[in-house]
Amino acid sequence: MRRAVVSSAATAAGIVLLLSLKPHGGAGAAPVISSGGTGGATDTSSGSSSGSAGSSGSSGSSGSSSTRTVTGDAANTRYGPVQVKVTLDGSRITNVDVIQYPSNDHRDQEINSYALPLLNQEAIAAQSAQIDVVSGATYTSAGYTRSLQSALDKAGR
């Protein structure tokens, strides 16, 4: 009889603890992380979409006939999709914007706030998708390089 009371009390306490946990809520739209102008600062003027993995393409030119912007395919990773938009001047990469990346919780935001600007700098320096991964952001780095290569392929590079 005593075991039944202790067991029931422990079960009730466990249920109360489980019900008191808060579920992970979406943090909303993630800001675009750009390599342009301010050296990788966050640009909050445009949010990322949480759309499908294949919804991307080339956008129109943004100024001269040799400057164009190409959006790569969203690359699915373990923690969410990563998608980049590349600005090219001729065949030279001049800017990389990360328009979609994992930002579901504080840890995702922390990792991507330092990893994505580094990846942007690496891509511009290398002028290709052949860049090093960022330690601690392996999945994001892999998704970044896949999306970047997709954009470069669409641009004919």
Image (tube, rainbow, N blue to C red):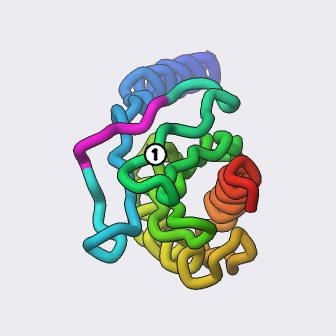
**Farthest-out residue, bottom:** 125
For residue 71, say whether it is visible: yes
Q: Residue 4: where, in percent of width, then height? A: 62, 17
113 vs 73, left or right, is: left
Q: Residue 94: where, in percent of width, then height? A: 47, 70
What residue appears at the point 69 percent right and 57 percent down from the top-left corner?
Answer: 152
Q: Tell me the chief SS of the magenta region.
A: strand
In the image, 64 versus 98, the foreground residue is 64
For residue 21, say whether it is visible: no
Q: Residue 9: where, in percent of width, then height? A: 49, 22
Q: Is residue 92 above or below residue 53?
A: below
In the image, 108 versus 8, the foreground residue is 108
Q: Is 113 a magenta residue?
A: no
Q: Is residue 40 above or below residue 46?
A: below
What residue appears at the point 46 percent right and 31 percent down from the top-left corner?
Answer: 49
139 vs 109, left or right, is: right
Which residue is tagged 1? Answer: 61
What residue appears at the point 57 percent right and 44 percent down from the top-left corner?
Answer: 71
The magenta span reads: 44-49
Element type where label 1 sits in the image: strand
What residue appears at the point 76 percent right and 53 percent down from the top-left corner?
Answer: 153
Q: Amino acid at mark 1?
A: Ser
79 vs 63, left or right, is: right
| Quadrant assignment for the C terminus | bottom right
